[in-house]
Amino acid sequence: MQASVNAEVRYLNPEWKGRTDSPRIGDRTSRRANTSKRAVAIDDARGLDLGLDTSGFVLTRHESGVRDFRDEAQVRDTYYREVGNVVRDMTGADAVFVYSHTVRTEDTSDFNVAYARFVHCDYSLAGAAERRRNALAKHRADLDPARHWEFAWFNTWQPFEREVRKNPLAVIDARTLDLGDVLDYYYTGYRNKPGPETGAMEGGAASSMPVFNPDQRFYYFSRMQTDEMMVIKQLDTRPGRARGCPHTSFDIDAPPDAPGRRSIEVRMACAYAS
């Protein structure tokens, strides 16, 4: 375990907490207009007692059979099945629906796939009931209508080609997150790129961001290897569990010649019957 590192991360501007409308972010200009940097300490989570129902994130080992993560067919045919099975086994899900993925590299030309440099959750934490209704309708053919279903949405996040020396991923421990500090925003970057889980619509995809609170605790995993994978909860409709885990990329001291981070994240929904 390494010592804590200090970094600046972008939070939603605090004035949004008193407003009835929601910001829209879909490019660097709108990100700068609606967020501001705060200095935070980010602790190394290696060796800590973590759980998806408590902290909202964990680290696991995963050696993928995919050899080229830029090959869409390999990722969809092999990696989706691999990571879906990992999360199914980890959470006891009765059904898993893998939706989409994003490959991120040092290329900054496309805001949608560049490193995400603001603290956010991929879904609206306040909109859990509506998202559950939508998931039930979407997956009705795959779920026993005689049973009661709840859902949780997860991302997996894994480096490929090399260990992470630059731009690692930080998360807020869900145990330190006051849901009253988490506000909706609309991600508009995908408005012209509809997909099964982007929520693409005229107003953008309903997502969420926290405002700064000094009680929030950030963690990362130092020098993640290509056979390591984070699982991060994005939203959970089940009571008594972590609701979601905000995350962001951040700058960390690294040798000048250290290569940029390359990673793949996969989004999925898990269904739980009772």
Image (spheres, grey):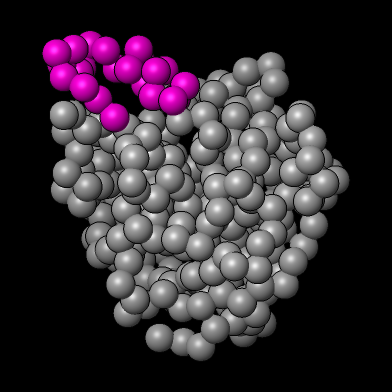
Note whether residue 5 is visible.
yes
Q: Is residue 9 magenta?
A: no
Quarter of the figure that contains the C terminus = top left
Q: Nearer the viewer, residue 272 or 113?
A: 272
Note whether residue 264 is visible.
no
Residue 134 place in picture, x, y as percent: 41, 17
Residue 11 is left or right of residue 59, and the answer is right
Quarter of the figure that contains the N terminus = bottom left
Residue 220 is left or right of residue 7, and the answer is left
Q: Nearer the viewer, residue 245 or 79?
A: 245
- Examine the rendered structure and indicate whether residue 139 appears above or below residue 183: above
User: What's the magenta region?
Assistant: 129-150
Q: Residue at x 32, y 17 (%)?
A: 136
Q: Nearer the viewer, residue 166 or 140?
A: 140
Residue 268 place in picture, x, y as percent: 36, 36
- Examine the rendered structure and indicate whether residue 207 appears above or below residue 171: above
Q: Is residue 132 magenta?
A: yes
Q: Residue at x 79, y 35 (%)?
A: 19
- Examine the rendered structure and indicate whether residue 30 appears above or below residue 69: above
Q: Residue at x 34, y 48 (%)?
A: 241
